[in-house]
Image: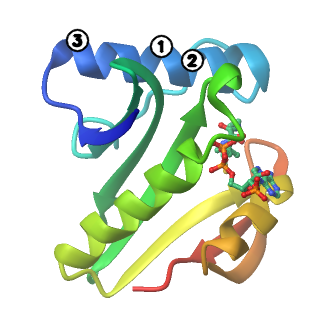
Amino acid sequence: MLEIRIAKNGTDLREAMNIRRSIFVDEQRLYTISDEDEFDSQATHLLAAANGNIVGTVRVYSGKNGTWWGGRLAILPSSRGKDTGSSLVKAAVELVREAKAKRFLAYIQSQNVPFFERLGWKKVEDISCCGLPHVLMEAPL
Ligand SMILES: CC(C)(COP(=O)(O)OP(=O)(O)OC[C@H]1O[C@@H](n2cnc3c(N)ncnc32)[C@H](O)[C@@H]1OP(=O)(O)O)[C@@H](O)C(=O)NCCC(=O)NCCS
């Protein structure tokens, strides 16, 4: 059974950061030591738990002028292709919608653009991020 919930304590957060590190540092090599940054302390971190085990995460945080930002969507390889990523993105959009955001944006790795388009996100512009092609995308609110 898949459960999507907000990280509620230090243990939850450590698990989310461990998943992120295993993917963004070890698997994708986007960062050398850690992908953690100054936005983590203000972000809401959503977790996906499959049969009680945390297998994925995404973060959202509010920026300027009613714009919210999403990022660091990461699903453990063994849990991919089972709707985990989609469920996390939908929950993130719902959270941001309830917060009355004006816009919800994210920098998306180019190879994942079709995944977000299937969820109704639209391309805003092409950009480079971490030395890799990314696309700024906007969620339907
Ligand atoms: C991209 C990622 C989040 C997708 O998560 P996931 O749990 O595998 O996705 P889902 O199972 O919810 O996928 C739903 C559908 O989208 C498809 N899909 C998944 N990734 C896709 C991609 N990159 N491009 C196109 N379609 C994709 C799935 O095949 C599935 O299709 P189906 O319903 O016809 O079977 C996951 O592969 C991941 O963590 N990748 C590494 C980290 C990463 O790239 N993060 C995103 C940074 S922008």
Check disc 3 and report the residue beneath it: 11
Q: Secondary structure at mark 3?
A: helix
**Screen quadrant of the N terminus:** top left
Q: Say which label, 3 or 2, has the lower sequence index.
A: 3
Q: As displayed, is residue 19 above or below residue 83? A: above
Query: Mark 1 sits on what residue?
Result: 18
Gap between marks 2 and 1, in whole Å?
5 Å
Q: Can you name the residue that lies furthest to the left here?
A: 9
* Above or below 76: residue 81: below
Amino acid type, label 2: Arg
Q: CA distance from mark 1 to mark 3?
A: 11 Å
Find disc 2 in the rendering and name its residue: 21
- Under tag 1, what secondary structure? helix
Q: CA distance from mark 3 to mark 2?
A: 15 Å
* Residue 59 position within the rendered picture, expressed as x and y whole percent measured from the top left: 39, 46
> x and y percent of residue 135 in the render?
74, 67
Please give the count of numbered marks on the rendered protein: 3
Answer whether labels 2 and 1 touch (C-beta < 8 Å).
Answer: yes
Please give the name of the residue rendered at 28% of the width and 22% of the height, measured from the top-left corner: 13
Residue 79 in percent (x, y) is at 63, 28
